[in-house]
Amino acid sequence: MSPLATDLAAVVALSRRDLIRFFRDRSQILGAVGRPAIWMLLFATGLHHAFSSDLDSRIGYKQFAYAGAIAMTILFGGMFQGVTIVWDREFGMLRAVLVAPVSRTAIVLGKTLAGACVTLLQGFAAAAFAPLVEVHFGAFDAVRLLAAMAVMALAVTALGVTVGSRMRTFEGFGVISNFVVLPLYFLSGGVFPTSGLPPWMHALVLANPVTYGVDLMRASIGQPHAFAATIDVGVQAVFATAMCLAALGAFRRAAG
Amino acid sequence: MTAAPAVCTRALSRSYGSLKALDELDLEVARGQLFALLGPNGAGKSTTIAILTTLLAPTSGEAMVAGWDVVRSPRQVRASIGVVFQEISLDDRLTARENLEFHAMTHGIDASRRSPRIAEALASVGLSSAAGKRVRAFSGGMKRRLEIARAMLHEPAVLVLDEPTVGLDPQTRRTVWEQLAAIAATRERTVFVTTHYMDEAERCDDVAIVDHGRLIARGSPAALVARAGGERLVVRTEDDAKAAAHAQALGWRVGNDAGRLVIEGDRPEAMLARLAERAAGIREATIVRPKLEDAFVALTGRELRDVREEGGDRAAMATNLRARGRR
């Protein structure tokens, strides 16, 4: 096999491995379904009645929080995939991959794609709760939504791999990933509307790439949204590319 | 390329801050050998393995594996080696077969050849019936055997194993070594193994002893043992002076160690019989055949820390020898 063919086979092998692991881990599947279910049913429905008056009159909070709940699932799911890097190093599997005749780029790409696939599956589970929060869209919109989710899953997983490559312990990873994920989530416009925020906070919302991912999801299913779709797509593309490059850099530095 | 030695290092050094883990190590291992790198913990064995497997860059000097430079051609080096790390590095959520499939895909084995190669590799380590079982249900020995099968899957020129039997029960240790001997016996592959078990090193064709990151001895186990001195007879008699006189009259070299006569010679059994004819009252007689461990002690002035737990007798003997060496 040529080096390129071996690299491609390695990407497939890494992806296949993580998918097998995901489907064999009942707690991961339960988490994928359970977290958005709790969020949408309890949190969103509860708040729906509390402050629906402040929102855009065309949708209620349940509908508003739908894209946010998917984004949350992808953020937590994608970052958690970075833990597989720590896990692999801790339990030696990573070393077995590092002595294989494949390029470091293929290993990072494989790990990231694998994680993005698993994350996207979790996102599917969240998106499937649409009827529960009275969000309705057609098949074409569903495809657009999935595409928006896929780009975000890739970007966030690459971020997880970047953090995971730099961490030596599970505990460290847990702390750092919460520090990264929570602000990205709260400042994304997915939890509360961004109109009427103090200027400093609004600036952070605009600087947060996840904001545009949430906006793109809303646009794709015909909900009111803040930016032009081209801006959303552009920001997401830059976000995903930058994170993949960061993951590559961090992994190379860690792996030598 | 085939003429190049399996492993060749020149002035290979690696420092961690001020600590020299490897200090100008020169090592050449011929192809087709069962080779052991022997040394106490912290001697530089694992650092050597990390450099040879391209996981660690040397601070200075060079290392070649199967003719490829580990720094300039890491990918070719990785394609030439099969590695078994000290810690188990399998994915325990996957089955044995899935682990090997993963390895095959990351080692450029064509899709059409994967299945037969995997079946063959599993059979070679006696794990055919466990192929579909998840590795987390495997015993330590089964995991290690699976790792050896995995390391052999892509038919590497050099099989590298870092202390492969640490933590295994005696039966599994024996099985592992039978497998390594079988692999080396074909002379198609070099087996490069690190160990701190003397009995394991004694099974090898070629042994290098390292300590403090330096090569301190090199040769076949027999040649190394010969350096620790020949066989000898140790006796305690009712009248040592008389026995010593008899021995000297027969032309043997006689010494004294902790109240016992030490008589050196080639055939200690025959010596004991002849001595018994002349000098009555032999209370105690021991025939000492030096082992690799004695060579190690003679060369390094210390015994292997981890071996001490294994047998009180040997450790006691080693201590005696060390005491003698200082005189």
Image (tube, rainbow, N blue to C red):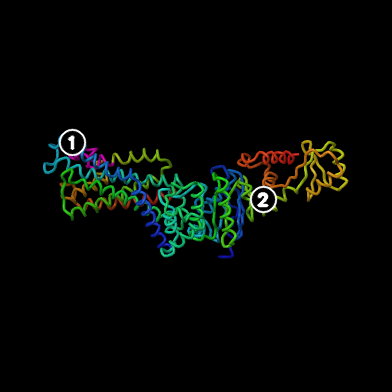
Secondary structure beneath dot 2 equals strand
Q: Is residue A201 magenta?
A: yes
Residue at horizontal 64%, vertical 56%? B205
Q: Residue pushed farthest top?
A: A50
Three-letter amino acid code of the residue under disc 1: Leu
Looking at the image, which is closer to me, A65 or A196? Answer: A65
Tell me, yes or no, whether the highlighted magenta stretch contains residue A190.
yes
Task: Say left or right for A81 vs A55.
Answer: right
Q: Is residue B18 left or right of residue A32?
A: right
Name the image quarter holding residue B41.
top right
Q: Output the chain of dot 1.
A: A
Marks 1/2 same chain: no
Q: Callout 2: residue from which chain?
A: B
Q: Which residue is mark 2?
A: B217
Q: Position of residue A173 (x, y in %)?
A: 38, 41
Q: Which residues are magenta?
A: A184-202
B50 horizontally vs B242: left or right: left
Q: Residues within 10 Å of mark 2 (few under 14, many from 20)?
A: some
Residue B240 screen position, x and y as percent: 84, 38
Q: Is residue A53 left or right of residue B138?
A: left
Residue A62 vertical placement versus A8 (above, below): above
Q: Which residue is mark 1?
A: A47
**Residue beneath the point at 72% across and 47% down:** B289
Separation of residues labelled 1 and 2 (CA atoms): 76 Å
Q: Amino acid at mark 2?
A: Ala
Residue B250 is at least partly visible in this image: yes
**Can you give x and y, in whole percent of width and height, for residue A203 in the image?**
24, 41
Q: Is residue B71 visible?
A: no
